[in-house]
Amino acid sequence: MKFDDLKNLDLSKVREQILAYSVQVTRSYWEIGRRLHFAKSFLLSEEGFLPWLETTYISYDEANRMMFVAKNLPKVACYEHLGLSLLYLIATIPEEHRQKVYSLPSGRRKYLHQMSQLELRTVKRLLKAGQLESCFQGDSVPQADCQQGAKGTQDVTTSELSQASSPQSSAAYQAATQQDPT
């Protein structure tokens, strides 16, 4: 498509194209991570990886994140719209906590792949402190179908959910979100 053709598109088509490209980018993170891991493990010596990595124009930190995502996070359709930083955050959360629906203090119910970076960092911080269940009331129902879960829980807010969020939970959530992001 030529650049001039963009002015003939409407907003919904532009959005569709952006989402299609973002899926391609996210799939590439897994594939690049798999190949980087293979090269590091089987094709290069320990001291040969960094000089070789420089020839790919990928930073060491970014390469490590891609390899970690490829190794620890399954390639699932519900993750295909996320960027590398969100994929990495989800990959660092233990597997048994990845498929839960969390009732946030705001009353919204979300899977991890629907959360913002701040919400994911808060989940991770609370999990590390052993306070996750008291603040995020995670449902233990496994996520059978990501796409169905994304449609069914993204904007769910009911009076029952807002009542489930106690003031103590909200206070712990707010305290965790105000800490220094790491």
Image (cartoon, rainbow, N blue to C red):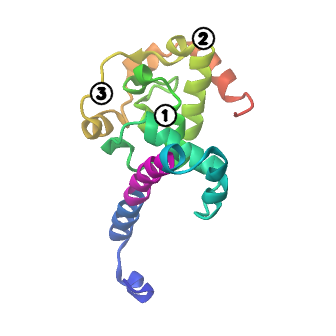
Foreground pick, 115 / 56 = 56
Q: Quadrant of the N terminus?
A: bottom left
Q: Position of residue 142 (x, y in %)?
A: 30, 22
Q: Quick one: SS at disc 2?
A: helix
User: Decide: marks 3, 2 in contact (CB < 8 A)?
Assistant: no
Q: Quick one: SS at disc 1?
A: helix
Residue identified by numbered label 1: 91
Q: Is label 3 or label 1 in front?
A: 1
Give the residue type that dot 1 points to: Ala
Q: Position of residue 124 (x, y in %)?
A: 57, 25
Q: Residue at x 42, y 38 (%)?
A: 113
Q: Position of residue 152 (x, y in %)?
A: 28, 34
Q: Residue at x 40, y 31 (%)?
A: 111
Give the residue type that dot 3 points to: Gln
Using the numbered discs, state the Cα–Cα distance from disc 1 to disc 2 in whole angstroms. Answer: 28 Å
Q: Residue at x 66, y 23 (%)?
A: 176
Residue identified by numbered label 3: 143
**Residue 170 seen in the current view:** no
Foreground pick, 177 / 80 = 80
